[in-house]
Amino acid sequence: MILLFSLLSSKYTIKAILIITLIVSSFSSYFMNNYHVVIDNDMLRNAMQTDLHESLDLLSFKMLVYILFLGLIPSWLVYKTKLQTQTFKEASLSKLKTVLLSFLLMAVFLFSFSQFYTSFFREHKPLRYYTNPTYWMYSVGNYIGKTFNSTPVVVKALGLDAHISKSAVPKLVIMVVGEAVRADHFSLNGYEKETNPLLKQEKIINFPKMYACGTSTAYSVPCMFSVLNRHDYSYKKGISNENVLDVLSHTNEVDILWRDNNSDSKGVALRVPYEDYKTPTNNTLCERGECRDEGMLVGLDTYIKERKNRDILIVLHQMGNHGPAYYKRYPKTFEKFTPVCKTNQLEACTSESISNAYDNAILYSDYFLSKTIQLLKKHKDSHETSMVYMSDHGESLGESGLYLHGLPYFMAPDAQTHIASFMWFGDEAKKIDTQKSYSQDNLFHTLLGLFSVETEVYNKQMDILNEHN
Protein backbone atom coordinates (compact mmCIF):
# COMPACT_ATOMS: atom_id res chain seq x y z
CA MET A 1 0.00 0.00 0.00
CA ILE A 2 2.86 2.39 0.87
CA LEU A 3 4.47 1.49 -2.45
CA LEU A 4 1.24 2.24 -4.32
CA PHE A 5 0.76 5.64 -2.65
CA SER A 6 4.39 6.52 -3.29
CA LEU A 7 4.10 5.80 -7.00
CA LEU A 8 0.74 7.52 -7.57
CA SER A 9 1.03 10.58 -5.36
CA SER A 10 2.74 13.92 -5.56
CA LYS A 11 2.83 17.00 -3.36
CA TYR A 12 -0.39 18.20 -5.01
CA THR A 13 -2.31 14.92 -4.91
CA ILE A 14 -1.17 13.05 -1.80
CA LYS A 15 -3.66 14.70 0.56
CA ALA A 16 -6.63 14.19 -1.75
CA ILE A 17 -5.70 10.53 -2.30
CA LEU A 18 -5.27 9.88 1.42
CA ILE A 19 -8.52 11.64 2.38
CA ILE A 20 -10.58 9.74 -0.21
CA THR A 21 -8.95 6.47 0.90
CA LEU A 22 -9.67 7.15 4.58
CA ILE A 23 -13.33 8.10 4.06
CA VAL A 24 -14.13 5.19 1.72
CA SER A 25 -12.25 2.80 4.01
CA SER A 26 -14.33 3.95 6.98
CA PHE A 27 -17.52 2.96 5.12
CA SER A 28 -15.91 -0.31 4.02
CA SER A 29 -14.79 -1.05 7.58
CA TYR A 30 -18.30 -0.45 8.94
CA PHE A 31 -20.03 -2.84 6.54
CA MET A 32 -17.35 -5.52 6.75
CA ASN A 33 -17.20 -5.45 10.56
CA ASN A 34 -20.94 -5.28 11.18
CA TYR A 35 -22.45 -7.33 8.35
CA HIS A 36 -19.40 -9.36 7.26
CA VAL A 37 -20.04 -8.43 3.63
CA VAL A 38 -17.35 -8.41 0.95
CA ILE A 39 -16.77 -5.21 -1.04
CA ASP A 40 -16.32 -6.78 -4.47
CA ASN A 41 -17.39 -5.46 -7.86
CA ASP A 42 -20.86 -7.07 -7.59
CA MET A 43 -21.42 -5.45 -4.19
CA LEU A 44 -20.34 -2.09 -5.65
CA ARG A 45 -22.81 -2.54 -8.51
CA ASN A 46 -25.53 -3.38 -6.00
CA ALA A 47 -24.67 -0.22 -4.03
CA MET A 48 -24.61 1.97 -7.15
CA GLN A 49 -28.07 0.72 -8.13
CA THR A 50 -29.59 1.18 -4.66
CA ASP A 51 -31.98 4.12 -4.34
CA LEU A 52 -32.01 6.76 -1.58
CA HIS A 53 -34.89 5.12 0.31
CA GLU A 54 -33.03 1.81 0.59
CA SER A 55 -29.78 3.59 1.51
CA LEU A 56 -31.46 5.36 4.44
CA ASP A 57 -32.36 1.95 5.88
CA LEU A 58 -28.64 1.38 6.39
CA LEU A 59 -27.97 4.68 8.17
CA SER A 60 -27.29 4.40 11.91
CA PHE A 61 -25.52 6.17 14.77
CA LYS A 62 -22.86 3.46 14.76
CA MET A 63 -22.15 4.11 11.08
CA LEU A 64 -21.69 7.81 11.81
CA VAL A 65 -19.25 6.95 14.62
CA TYR A 66 -17.20 4.81 12.22
CA ILE A 67 -17.13 7.55 9.59
CA LEU A 68 -16.26 10.24 12.16
CA PHE A 69 -13.40 8.44 13.92
CA LEU A 70 -12.02 6.36 11.05
CA GLY A 71 -12.73 8.76 8.20
CA LEU A 72 -13.39 12.41 8.98
CA ILE A 73 -11.05 13.05 11.94
CA PRO A 74 -8.04 11.32 10.30
CA SER A 75 -8.87 13.18 7.06
CA TRP A 76 -8.87 16.50 8.94
CA LEU A 77 -5.44 15.67 10.42
CA VAL A 78 -4.13 14.84 6.95
CA TYR A 79 -5.55 18.10 5.61
CA LYS A 80 -3.91 20.17 8.38
CA THR A 81 -0.51 18.50 8.01
CA LYS A 82 2.05 20.77 6.36
CA LEU A 83 4.12 19.07 3.68
CA GLN A 84 7.82 19.70 3.35
CA THR A 85 8.73 21.47 0.13
CA GLN A 86 11.06 19.40 -2.04
CA THR A 87 12.70 19.94 -5.38
CA PHE A 88 11.83 17.56 -8.18
CA LYS A 89 15.17 15.80 -7.71
CA GLU A 90 14.63 15.41 -3.95
CA ALA A 91 11.07 14.15 -4.43
CA SER A 92 12.17 11.63 -7.06
CA LEU A 93 15.01 10.40 -4.86
CA SER A 94 12.64 10.06 -1.90
CA LYS A 95 10.20 8.01 -3.99
CA LEU A 96 13.03 5.82 -5.26
CA LYS A 97 14.16 5.13 -1.70
CA THR A 98 10.59 4.24 -0.69
CA VAL A 99 10.17 1.92 -3.66
CA LEU A 100 13.49 0.15 -3.04
CA LEU A 101 12.83 -0.17 0.69
CA SER A 102 9.33 -1.55 0.01
CA PHE A 103 10.66 -4.16 -2.40
CA LEU A 104 13.42 -5.09 0.06
CA LEU A 105 10.95 -5.56 2.92
CA MET A 106 8.61 -7.60 0.71
CA ALA A 107 11.49 -9.81 -0.42
CA VAL A 108 12.65 -10.42 3.16
CA PHE A 109 9.09 -11.11 4.24
CA LEU A 110 8.37 -13.54 1.41
CA PHE A 111 11.61 -15.48 1.68
CA SER A 112 11.43 -15.69 5.47
CA PHE A 113 7.80 -16.75 5.78
CA SER A 114 6.87 -17.96 2.29
CA GLN A 115 6.24 -21.56 3.30
CA PHE A 116 3.93 -20.57 6.15
CA TYR A 117 1.97 -17.89 4.30
CA THR A 118 1.66 -19.87 1.07
CA SER A 119 0.02 -22.65 3.03
CA PHE A 120 -2.01 -20.24 5.17
CA PHE A 121 -3.54 -18.28 2.29
CA ARG A 122 -4.16 -21.46 0.29
CA GLU A 123 -6.24 -22.74 3.20
CA HIS A 124 -7.89 -19.37 3.92
CA LYS A 125 -8.58 -17.88 0.48
CA PRO A 126 -11.53 -15.71 1.62
CA LEU A 127 -9.20 -13.62 3.83
CA ARG A 128 -8.01 -11.54 0.89
CA TYR A 129 -11.58 -10.32 0.38
CA TYR A 130 -11.49 -8.64 3.79
CA THR A 131 -8.28 -6.62 3.41
CA ASN A 132 -9.03 -2.93 3.79
CA PRO A 133 -8.35 -0.75 1.76
CA THR A 134 -6.58 -2.89 -0.83
CA TYR A 135 -9.53 -5.10 -1.79
CA TRP A 136 -12.10 -2.34 -2.24
CA MET A 137 -9.54 -0.47 -4.38
CA TYR A 138 -9.09 -3.56 -6.53
CA SER A 139 -12.89 -3.96 -6.70
CA VAL A 140 -13.37 -0.35 -7.86
CA GLY A 141 -10.95 -0.95 -10.73
CA ASN A 142 -12.65 -4.24 -11.52
CA TYR A 143 -16.10 -2.60 -11.41
CA ILE A 144 -15.03 0.20 -13.77
CA GLY A 145 -13.46 -2.30 -16.16
CA LYS A 146 -16.57 -4.49 -16.21
CA THR A 147 -19.12 -1.67 -16.31
CA PHE A 148 -17.93 1.15 -18.52
CA ASN A 149 -17.23 0.79 -22.21
CA SER A 150 -15.31 3.09 -24.51
CA THR A 151 -17.91 2.38 -27.20
CA PRO A 152 -21.73 2.39 -26.93
CA VAL A 153 -23.30 -0.90 -25.87
CA VAL A 154 -24.90 -2.71 -28.79
CA VAL A 155 -27.71 -4.98 -27.63
CA LYS A 156 -27.71 -8.25 -29.55
CA ALA A 157 -31.18 -9.32 -30.70
CA LEU A 158 -32.43 -12.65 -29.41
CA GLY A 159 -35.21 -14.91 -30.64
CA LEU A 160 -36.33 -12.84 -33.62
CA ASP A 161 -37.91 -16.01 -34.99
CA ALA A 162 -40.17 -16.35 -31.94
CA HIS A 163 -43.82 -17.10 -32.65
CA ILE A 164 -46.79 -18.59 -30.84
CA SER A 165 -49.24 -21.17 -32.05
CA LYS A 166 -52.42 -19.49 -30.85
CA SER A 167 -54.50 -21.54 -28.43
CA ALA A 168 -58.26 -21.26 -28.00
CA VAL A 169 -57.83 -19.46 -24.66
CA PRO A 170 -55.28 -16.65 -24.18
CA LYS A 171 -52.77 -16.98 -21.35
CA LEU A 172 -52.34 -14.75 -18.32
CA VAL A 173 -49.12 -15.20 -16.34
CA ILE A 174 -48.06 -13.16 -13.32
CA MET A 175 -44.37 -13.48 -12.52
CA VAL A 176 -43.48 -12.33 -9.00
CA VAL A 177 -39.82 -11.59 -8.32
CA GLY A 178 -39.31 -11.91 -4.57
CA GLU A 179 -36.65 -10.12 -2.55
CA ALA A 180 -34.18 -11.90 -0.24
CA VAL A 181 -36.39 -14.88 0.67
CA ARG A 182 -34.41 -17.96 1.66
CA ALA A 183 -35.96 -21.39 1.16
CA ASP A 184 -35.61 -22.62 4.74
CA HIS A 185 -37.90 -19.88 6.11
CA PHE A 186 -40.84 -20.94 3.93
CA SER A 187 -43.20 -23.19 5.90
CA LEU A 188 -44.02 -24.78 2.53
CA ASN A 189 -40.50 -26.20 2.81
CA GLY A 190 -41.01 -27.52 6.34
CA TYR A 191 -40.03 -24.45 8.39
CA GLU A 192 -41.42 -24.77 11.93
CA LYS A 193 -43.05 -21.31 11.93
CA GLU A 194 -46.21 -20.98 9.84
CA THR A 195 -45.01 -18.33 7.38
CA ASN A 196 -47.25 -19.50 4.50
CA PRO A 197 -50.71 -20.00 6.05
CA LEU A 198 -52.58 -18.72 2.98
CA LEU A 199 -50.43 -20.27 0.27
CA LYS A 200 -50.75 -23.71 1.84
CA GLN A 201 -54.50 -23.50 1.14
CA GLU A 202 -53.83 -23.19 -2.60
CA LYS A 203 -52.73 -25.85 -5.07
CA ILE A 204 -49.13 -24.75 -5.00
CA ILE A 205 -46.35 -26.54 -6.85
CA ASN A 206 -43.45 -25.83 -4.53
CA PHE A 207 -39.77 -26.11 -5.46
CA PRO A 208 -37.77 -26.91 -2.31
CA LYS A 209 -34.49 -27.16 -4.24
CA MET A 210 -34.33 -23.89 -6.18
CA TYR A 211 -31.04 -21.99 -6.38
CA ALA A 212 -30.15 -18.41 -7.35
CA CYS A 213 -27.57 -17.49 -9.98
CA GLY A 214 -26.20 -14.71 -7.78
CA THR A 215 -26.30 -13.34 -4.25
CA SER A 216 -27.45 -9.78 -4.96
CA THR A 217 -30.41 -8.16 -6.71
CA ALA A 218 -28.17 -6.35 -9.20
CA TYR A 219 -26.73 -9.67 -10.36
CA SER A 220 -29.55 -12.18 -9.90
CA VAL A 221 -32.46 -10.28 -11.47
CA PRO A 222 -30.89 -9.73 -14.93
CA CYS A 223 -29.28 -13.18 -14.73
CA MET A 224 -32.58 -15.00 -14.10
CA PHE A 225 -34.21 -13.40 -17.16
CA SER A 226 -31.14 -14.03 -19.33
CA VAL A 227 -30.63 -16.94 -21.73
CA LEU A 228 -27.13 -17.30 -20.26
CA ASN A 229 -26.63 -19.71 -17.39
CA ARG A 230 -24.93 -18.80 -14.12
CA HIS A 231 -21.47 -19.90 -15.25
CA ASP A 232 -21.64 -17.95 -18.54
CA TYR A 233 -23.41 -14.83 -17.28
CA SER A 234 -21.60 -11.55 -16.59
CA TYR A 235 -22.76 -7.95 -16.29
CA LYS A 236 -21.40 -6.99 -19.72
CA LYS A 237 -22.91 -10.04 -21.40
CA GLY A 238 -26.21 -9.30 -19.68
CA ILE A 239 -26.52 -5.74 -20.96
CA SER A 240 -25.29 -6.76 -24.42
CA ASN A 241 -28.01 -9.36 -25.02
CA GLU A 242 -31.79 -9.23 -25.07
CA ASN A 243 -33.65 -11.23 -22.42
CA VAL A 244 -36.76 -13.40 -22.25
CA LEU A 245 -39.08 -10.36 -22.13
CA ASP A 246 -37.65 -9.25 -25.48
CA VAL A 247 -38.17 -12.71 -26.97
CA LEU A 248 -41.82 -12.66 -25.84
CA SER A 249 -42.18 -9.17 -27.34
CA HIS A 250 -40.87 -10.43 -30.69
CA THR A 251 -43.92 -12.71 -30.98
CA ASN A 252 -46.19 -9.61 -31.13
CA GLU A 253 -48.72 -11.74 -29.28
CA VAL A 254 -47.87 -11.04 -25.62
CA ASP A 255 -48.65 -7.81 -23.77
CA ILE A 256 -45.99 -7.26 -21.10
CA LEU A 257 -46.08 -5.01 -18.03
CA TRP A 258 -43.40 -4.63 -15.33
CA ARG A 259 -44.39 -3.07 -12.01
CA ASP A 260 -41.60 -2.36 -9.53
CA ASN A 261 -41.68 -1.78 -5.77
CA ASN A 262 -37.92 -2.40 -5.49
CA SER A 263 -35.03 -0.20 -6.65
CA ASP A 264 -35.62 -0.93 -10.38
CA SER A 265 -35.61 -3.76 -12.93
CA LYS A 266 -31.78 -3.81 -13.19
CA GLY A 267 -32.09 -3.30 -16.94
CA VAL A 268 -34.47 -6.21 -17.59
CA ALA A 269 -37.48 -4.02 -18.43
CA LEU A 270 -35.70 -1.37 -20.51
CA ARG A 271 -37.64 -2.30 -23.65
CA VAL A 272 -41.08 -3.10 -22.19
CA PRO A 273 -43.74 -0.99 -20.40
CA TYR A 274 -42.47 -0.19 -16.87
CA GLU A 275 -44.24 1.36 -13.87
CA ASP A 276 -42.56 2.55 -10.66
CA TYR A 277 -44.49 1.69 -7.47
CA LYS A 278 -41.94 2.87 -4.88
CA THR A 279 -43.68 6.21 -4.33
CA PRO A 280 -47.28 7.35 -3.70
CA THR A 281 -47.38 8.73 -7.24
CA ASN A 282 -48.49 5.29 -8.48
CA ASN A 283 -48.73 3.24 -5.29
CA THR A 284 -51.88 4.02 -3.31
CA LEU A 285 -50.85 1.82 -0.36
CA CYS A 286 -48.01 3.69 1.33
CA GLU A 287 -47.50 4.45 5.03
CA ARG A 288 -44.67 6.25 6.84
CA GLY A 289 -42.51 6.23 3.73
CA GLU A 290 -43.06 2.52 3.02
CA CYS A 291 -44.99 1.60 -0.11
CA ARG A 292 -46.49 -1.88 0.17
CA ASP A 293 -46.17 -4.63 -2.41
CA GLU A 294 -49.93 -5.15 -2.60
CA GLY A 295 -50.21 -1.65 -4.07
CA MET A 296 -48.86 -3.14 -7.31
CA LEU A 297 -52.11 -5.13 -7.66
CA VAL A 298 -54.29 -2.01 -7.81
CA GLY A 299 -55.58 -1.44 -11.34
CA LEU A 300 -54.46 -4.81 -12.72
CA ASP A 301 -58.03 -6.03 -12.90
CA THR A 302 -58.84 -3.27 -15.40
CA TYR A 303 -55.57 -3.81 -17.28
CA ILE A 304 -56.42 -7.50 -17.79
CA LYS A 305 -60.06 -6.87 -18.78
CA GLU A 306 -58.89 -4.49 -21.51
CA ARG A 307 -56.85 -7.35 -23.02
CA LYS A 308 -59.39 -10.17 -23.04
CA ASN A 309 -58.15 -11.74 -26.25
CA ARG A 310 -54.42 -11.23 -25.69
CA ASP A 311 -51.70 -13.21 -23.95
CA ILE A 312 -50.45 -11.25 -20.94
CA LEU A 313 -47.30 -11.36 -18.82
CA ILE A 314 -47.23 -9.16 -15.72
CA VAL A 315 -44.00 -8.98 -13.69
CA LEU A 316 -44.24 -7.73 -10.09
CA HIS A 317 -40.90 -6.93 -8.44
CA GLN A 318 -41.36 -6.98 -4.66
CA MET A 319 -39.72 -5.03 -1.85
CA GLY A 320 -40.26 -8.29 0.01
CA ASN A 321 -37.67 -8.99 2.71
CA HIS A 322 -35.22 -6.24 1.88
CA GLY A 323 -32.89 -5.83 4.85
CA PRO A 324 -31.59 -4.90 7.26
CA ALA A 325 -34.77 -3.11 8.41
CA TYR A 326 -37.02 -6.17 8.08
CA TYR A 327 -39.49 -4.70 10.60
CA LYS A 328 -40.40 -2.00 8.07
CA ARG A 329 -41.35 -4.48 5.37
CA TYR A 330 -44.81 -5.32 6.71
CA PRO A 331 -47.84 -3.55 8.25
CA LYS A 332 -48.20 -3.80 12.04
CA THR A 333 -51.09 -6.27 11.68
CA PHE A 334 -48.62 -8.87 10.36
CA GLU A 335 -46.38 -8.77 13.42
CA LYS A 336 -47.27 -12.31 14.48
CA PHE A 337 -43.83 -13.47 15.59
CA THR A 338 -42.35 -11.60 18.56
CA PRO A 339 -40.06 -10.20 19.95
CA VAL A 340 -38.96 -8.27 16.88
CA CYS A 341 -35.63 -6.62 16.04
CA LYS A 342 -36.61 -3.00 15.35
CA THR A 343 -33.26 -1.59 14.28
CA ASN A 344 -30.95 -1.90 11.31
CA GLN A 345 -28.13 -2.75 13.74
CA LEU A 346 -28.72 -6.49 13.46
CA GLU A 347 -25.67 -7.42 15.54
CA ALA A 348 -27.34 -5.64 18.50
CA CYS A 349 -30.40 -7.93 18.31
CA THR A 350 -30.91 -11.53 19.36
CA SER A 351 -31.04 -14.16 16.63
CA GLU A 352 -34.66 -14.85 17.62
CA SER A 353 -35.77 -11.23 17.17
CA ILE A 354 -33.99 -10.95 13.81
CA SER A 355 -35.62 -14.16 12.62
CA ASN A 356 -39.03 -12.99 13.85
CA ALA A 357 -38.83 -9.69 11.96
CA TYR A 358 -37.71 -11.53 8.83
CA ASP A 359 -40.48 -14.12 9.18
CA ASN A 360 -43.15 -11.44 9.65
CA ALA A 361 -42.06 -9.97 6.32
CA ILE A 362 -42.50 -13.40 4.71
CA LEU A 363 -45.93 -13.64 6.34
CA TYR A 364 -46.90 -10.38 4.64
CA SER A 365 -45.55 -11.69 1.32
CA ASP A 366 -47.73 -14.77 1.83
CA TYR A 367 -50.73 -12.42 2.04
CA PHE A 368 -49.61 -10.47 -1.05
CA LEU A 369 -49.05 -13.65 -3.07
CA SER A 370 -52.42 -15.02 -1.97
CA LYS A 371 -54.10 -11.80 -3.16
CA THR A 372 -52.29 -12.19 -6.49
CA ILE A 373 -53.73 -15.69 -6.85
CA GLN A 374 -57.23 -14.40 -6.02
CA LEU A 375 -56.82 -11.80 -8.77
CA LEU A 376 -55.89 -14.53 -11.25
CA LYS A 377 -58.89 -16.63 -10.24
CA LYS A 378 -61.20 -13.77 -11.23
CA HIS A 379 -59.98 -14.09 -14.82
CA LYS A 380 -60.04 -17.87 -15.22
CA ASP A 381 -62.99 -17.65 -17.64
CA SER A 382 -61.22 -15.32 -20.07
CA HIS A 383 -57.64 -16.56 -19.67
CA GLU A 384 -55.60 -19.63 -18.84
CA THR A 385 -54.06 -18.33 -15.62
CA SER A 386 -50.82 -19.13 -13.80
CA MET A 387 -48.32 -17.57 -11.42
CA VAL A 388 -44.57 -18.02 -11.02
CA TYR A 389 -42.84 -16.91 -7.82
CA MET A 390 -39.06 -16.82 -7.50
CA SER A 391 -36.92 -14.93 -5.00
CA ASP A 392 -33.86 -13.16 -6.41
CA HIS A 393 -31.47 -14.44 -3.72
CA GLY A 394 -31.46 -15.56 -0.10
CA GLU A 395 -30.34 -13.83 3.10
CA SER A 396 -27.99 -14.44 6.02
CA LEU A 397 -29.54 -13.70 9.42
CA GLY A 398 -26.48 -13.84 11.65
CA GLU A 399 -25.38 -17.43 11.14
CA SER A 400 -21.57 -17.57 11.54
CA GLY A 401 -21.63 -13.81 12.04
CA LEU A 402 -22.92 -13.17 8.50
CA TYR A 403 -25.78 -10.78 7.70
CA LEU A 404 -27.67 -9.71 4.57
CA HIS A 405 -26.33 -11.08 1.25
CA GLY A 406 -23.88 -10.38 -1.56
CA LEU A 407 -20.96 -12.67 -0.70
CA PRO A 408 -19.01 -14.04 -3.69
CA TYR A 409 -20.88 -17.14 -4.85
CA PHE A 410 -18.09 -19.60 -4.08
CA MET A 411 -18.00 -18.56 -0.42
CA ALA A 412 -21.70 -17.71 0.08
CA PRO A 413 -23.60 -19.92 2.54
CA ASP A 414 -26.65 -21.90 1.47
CA ALA A 415 -28.85 -19.25 3.12
CA GLN A 416 -27.85 -16.74 0.40
CA THR A 417 -28.17 -19.04 -2.63
CA HIS A 418 -31.01 -21.47 -1.74
CA ILE A 419 -34.19 -19.54 -2.54
CA ALA A 420 -37.96 -19.83 -2.16
CA SER A 421 -39.91 -20.56 -5.34
CA PHE A 422 -43.25 -22.02 -6.43
CA MET A 423 -45.81 -22.03 -9.24
CA TRP A 424 -49.60 -22.00 -9.31
CA PHE A 425 -51.86 -23.17 -12.15
CA GLY A 426 -55.30 -23.08 -10.55
CA ASP A 427 -57.09 -26.40 -10.84
CA GLU A 428 -54.90 -27.56 -13.71
CA ALA A 429 -52.69 -30.52 -12.84
CA LYS A 430 -49.03 -30.31 -13.85
CA LYS A 431 -46.66 -33.25 -13.88
CA ILE A 432 -43.46 -31.83 -12.38
CA ASP A 433 -40.65 -33.45 -10.43
CA THR A 434 -40.60 -31.04 -7.50
CA GLN A 435 -37.78 -32.89 -5.73
CA LYS A 436 -35.38 -32.22 -8.57
CA SER A 437 -32.82 -29.46 -8.14
CA TYR A 438 -33.59 -26.37 -10.27
CA SER A 439 -32.08 -22.91 -10.60
CA GLN A 440 -32.82 -19.50 -12.03
CA ASP A 441 -31.21 -20.77 -15.24
CA ASN A 442 -34.52 -22.57 -15.87
CA LEU A 443 -36.69 -19.43 -15.80
CA PHE A 444 -35.93 -18.18 -19.34
CA HIS A 445 -37.07 -21.42 -20.98
CA THR A 446 -39.95 -22.02 -18.55
CA LEU A 447 -41.52 -18.64 -19.36
CA LEU A 448 -41.23 -19.36 -23.08
CA GLY A 449 -42.81 -22.76 -22.48
CA LEU A 450 -45.69 -21.23 -20.53
CA PHE A 451 -46.63 -19.16 -23.58
CA SER A 452 -45.95 -22.02 -26.04
CA VAL A 453 -43.30 -19.95 -27.80
CA GLU A 454 -41.42 -21.62 -30.63
CA THR A 455 -37.93 -20.25 -31.23
CA GLU A 456 -34.42 -21.54 -31.77
CA VAL A 457 -33.32 -20.13 -28.39
CA TYR A 458 -35.85 -22.24 -26.47
CA ASN A 459 -34.38 -25.34 -24.82
CA LYS A 460 -37.14 -27.67 -23.66
CA GLN A 461 -34.67 -29.59 -21.49
CA MET A 462 -34.35 -26.43 -19.37
CA ASP A 463 -38.12 -25.89 -19.18
CA ILE A 464 -39.36 -26.96 -15.73
CA LEU A 465 -42.81 -27.66 -17.20
CA ASN A 466 -41.49 -30.03 -19.85
CA GLU A 467 -42.80 -33.41 -18.68
CA HIS A 468 -39.71 -35.15 -20.06
CA ASN A 469 -37.35 -32.86 -18.18
Image (cartoon, rainbow, N blue to C red):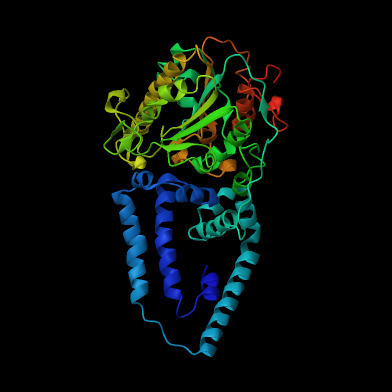
In the figure, 138 relative to 103: above or below? above
Image check: 177 left or right of 156?
left
The quarter holding residue 152 reads bottom right
Where residue 90 appears, as percent x and y from the top left, is 52, 88
On the image, which quarter does residue 335 sit in?
top left
Q: In this view, does 286 lie above or below 421?
A: below
Left or right: 227, with 135 as reference point:
right
Quadrant where the C terminus is found in the figure: top right
Image position, residue 66 (x, y; %)? 34, 56
Tell me which residue sits at (33%, 61%) in the image.
69
Q: Up-down: is 155 above or below 330?
A: below
Q: Which of 236 and 255 is in front in this view?
A: 255
The answer to whether residue 258 is visible is yes
How many marks the image carries: the answer is 0
Instruction: Give the left or right position of residue 300, taking residue 73 as reference.
Output: right
Q: Position of residue 385 (x, y in %)?
A: 52, 17
Given the current orientation, which residue lies at the most extreme right position? 456
